[in-house]
Amino acid sequence: MIKKKIKNFDIQTLSESGQIFRLNKISDNLFSLIIDGIYLEIKKIDDSNFLFSCSNDYFNTKLVHFFDLDTDYSFYKKLANKNDIFLQKCIKYGENIKILNQDPFEMLISFIISQRKSIKAIRTSIERLCKMCSKKHEIISEFTNKKIIYYPFPTENEILKCKNELLNTCGLGYRKEYILNACRLIKEKRIILNDLFSLQSNELIENLMKFKGVGIKVASCIALFAYHRFDICPIDVWIKRVIEQKYNGKIPTKYLPYIGIIQQYWFNYARLEKLK
DNA sequence: GTCCAGGTGAGTG
DNA sequence: CACTCACATGGA
């Protein structure tokens, strides 16, 4: 277990941000996270002090990048136009939101599942998929001393090997075939997710949309949350409402190079305040 | 029971 | 090009 002083890190808001589905609040100020096949816990001591159940080395080499801790967000927080009271309010409301650097395959499968589902339902479905396809792991929590059972996010091979009747219990509905199809394309190396990092954003989106079941919205989420493309804006039902109601249907051009992060401020506010 | 959710692909005009 | 429609299922 290590202690870290981190400024502008809001794990509670991140866990509700709709970009990560396996960061869970366990109890007051205690969160669990499954990435990279491992389970770790994060305890918030106060606004800028945290405990992590991992080594200092793992924190520095993996988590700093994952949580995007080496990026200074102060520039983005100042982007709101002077007369844009709404965006100012959104930024204040979720001022320590970050755009994470998550695994492309996990984002691909997670956001295929996400279509026409609530965030709560997405989480349930993903957890079932992990439980059905992936290997069971057990560890003892460093914080609670309780036994923890967890399942890493499955690989494409593990999903393909999973029996149909098990996959059918994951609540995937019509998305099941999309997921199997995506796993086949990856297994056959028809699309290599790690090779897409070098592409321009528009080419990246184009390539992601080769997966059946991945349209412009899901491709945009993957581009933003796995490939860190701040110039990409996933437009879902919430963002549609924001653009129509607050911006007369048009995004201010000044925001376009950073619309990914701005979109996340909008989304967080609109969803948690149930903007109608 | 009804309605909605971080949408997409196929079909039609 | 734009527009409509079916699509499974959980959660409120």
Image (cartoon, coloured by chain):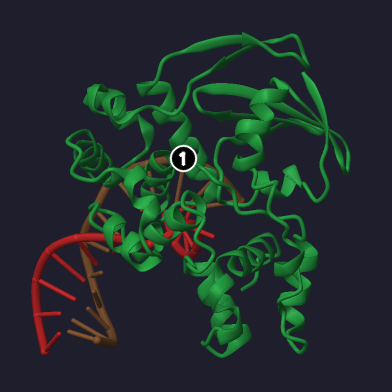
Chain colours: A green, B red, C brown
The picture places residue A34, in percent across and down from the top left corner, at 56, 28
Q: As displayed, is residue A246 above or below residue A202?
A: below
Q: Residue at x 44, y 29 (%)?
A: A153
Q: Visible in this render: residue A236?
A: no
Q: Position of residue A195 (x, y in %)?
A: 32, 46
User: Percent x, y for residue A211?
Assistant: 24, 52
A206 on left or right of A54? left
Instruction: Give above or below for A59 relative to A255.
Output: above
Estimate the x, y position of residue A168 in percent, counting from the top left: 29, 31
Give the left or right position of residue A165, taking residue A171 as reference. left
**Which residue lies under the disc numbered 1?**
A103
Q: Is residue A134 visible?
A: yes
The amino acid marked with disc number 1 is Asp
Label 1: element kind: loop
In the image shown, does A37 or A276 lie closer to the viewer? A37
Farthest-out residue, right: A46
User: Picture quarter containing residue A264?
Assistant: bottom right
Residue A1 quadrant: top right
Towards the viewer: A254 or A33: A254
